[in-house]
């Protein structure tokens, strides 16, 4: 079985090496696509203008490539791509995104939590210990992050929309609140996991100038970063954390999911 791997981040590179260790044939050359049974097109795949970030350059991927694919070819991306899903019906290949798989998303959340903690430890003058930390959202990324920060003896506050989550957060040692009651006046670190703007200028005006703002959500993000930076606050967006920190394990997770999907066919 021949795999094409677009290593547009470190996870892709690790996936190539992991598949080789598992005795698969692997290529990263576009000219080999027609011979491949399995294709990983990278983080997002191609856009509706057929542009693809390939390794470290952007190319235009002609639709003739799909006409030449072997029957029942598998194509993956990391994030779901609705354009590739449409093309899969037209050209009869099987399309999936890793982040559509519940088990993969859950494990990805653990890697994301470790990456955020790694960033905090290496970029702050003060420890997580006894810092007041606000985590917005309690989903696949928020939940393991909250648990890890509590284990490191941070003073962890968790902002959520759903009041049914308040007891669960309190039971693990966090301080839950509804987003409408957010108060950042004593906050040292704010970590957002919600992909819609919930931290607006009025809320940032409450915060200390020394606050550390971290956004791990997808666009349009959850923090008004332009306003925060205009006030001299430390404000960063950290996308695709497992592609920068725990990329070795991320590559193994990708290979595991590929093998599970192939074995079910």
Image: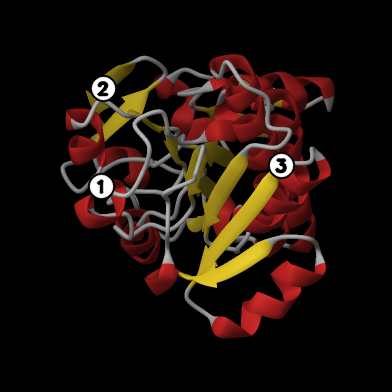
User: In this rendering, would 104 be left or right of 30?
Assistant: right
Q: State the mark number for residue 154.
A: 3
Residue 11 seen from this side: no
Q: CA distance from mark 2 to mark 3?
A: 42 Å
Q: State the mark number for residue 264.
A: none
Q: CA distance from mark 1 to mark 2?
A: 40 Å
Q: Nearer the viewer, residue 172 or 202?
A: 202
Q: Nearer the viewer, residue 154 or 78?
A: 154
Question: From what the image shows, is residue 34 above or below residue 200?
Answer: above
Name the residue rendered at 60%, 63% in the picture: 139
User: In this rendering, would 203 be left or right of 117?
Assistant: left
Q: Residues within 10 Å of mark 3 (few under 14, many from 20)?
A: many
User: In this rendering, would 71 be left or right of 89?
Assistant: right
Question: From what the image shows, is residue 82 above or below residue 66?
Answer: below
User: In this rendering, would 238 be left or right of 198?
Assistant: right
> CB under 8 Å between callouts 1 and 2?
no
Image coords of residue 261 (percent x, y): 71, 56
* Number of on-image labels: 3
Q: Quadrant of residue 90?
A: bottom left
Residue matched to label 2:
58
Q: Secondary structure at mark 3?
A: loop
Name the residue rendered at 32%, 48% in the picture: 223
Q: Secondary structure at mark 1?
A: loop
Q: State the mark number for residue 205.
A: 1
Q: Which quarter of the figure is the N terminus placed in?
A: top right
Q: Nearer the viewer, residue 98 or 188?
A: 188
Name the residue rendered at 67%, 22% in the picture: 14
Image coords of residue 59 (percent x, y): 25, 24
Image coords of residue 226 (percent x, y): 19, 36
Q: Residues within 10 Å of mark 1 (few under 14, many from 20)?
A: some
């Amino acid at each position: 079985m021949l795999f094409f791997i677009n290593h547009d981040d470190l996870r892709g590179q690790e996936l190539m090496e992991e598949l080789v260790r598992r005795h698969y044939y692997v290529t990263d050359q576009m000219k080999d696509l027609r011979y491949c049974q399995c294709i990983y097109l990278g983080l997002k795949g191609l856009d509706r203008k057929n542009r693809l970030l390939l390794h470290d350059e952007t190319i235009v991927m002609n639709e003739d490539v799909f006409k030449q694919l072997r029957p029942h070819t598998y194509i993956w991306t990391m994030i779901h791509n609705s354009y590739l899903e449409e093309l899969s019906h037209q050209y009869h290949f099987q399309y999936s995104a890793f982040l559509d798989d519940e088990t993969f998303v859950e494990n990805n959340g653990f890697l994301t939590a470790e990456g955020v903690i790694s960033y905090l430890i290496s970029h702050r003058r003060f420890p997580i210990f006894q810092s007041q930390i606000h985590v917005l959202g309690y989903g696949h990324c928020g939940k393991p992050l909250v648990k890890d920060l509590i284990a490191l003896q941070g003073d962890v506050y968790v902002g959520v929309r759903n009041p049914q989550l308040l007891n669960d957060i309190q039971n693990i040692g966090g301080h839950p609140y509804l987003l409408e009651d957010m108060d950042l006046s004593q906050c040292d670190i704010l970590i957002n996991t919600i992909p819609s703007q919930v931290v607006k200028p009025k809320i940032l005006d409450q915060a200390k100038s020394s606050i550390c703002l971290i956004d791990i959500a997808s666009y349009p993000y959850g923090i008004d970063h332009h306003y925060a930076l205009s006030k001299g606050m430390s404000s960063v967006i950290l996308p695709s954390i497992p592609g920068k920190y725990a990329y070795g394990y991320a590559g193994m997770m990708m290979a595991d999911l590929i093998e599970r999907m192939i074995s079910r066919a």
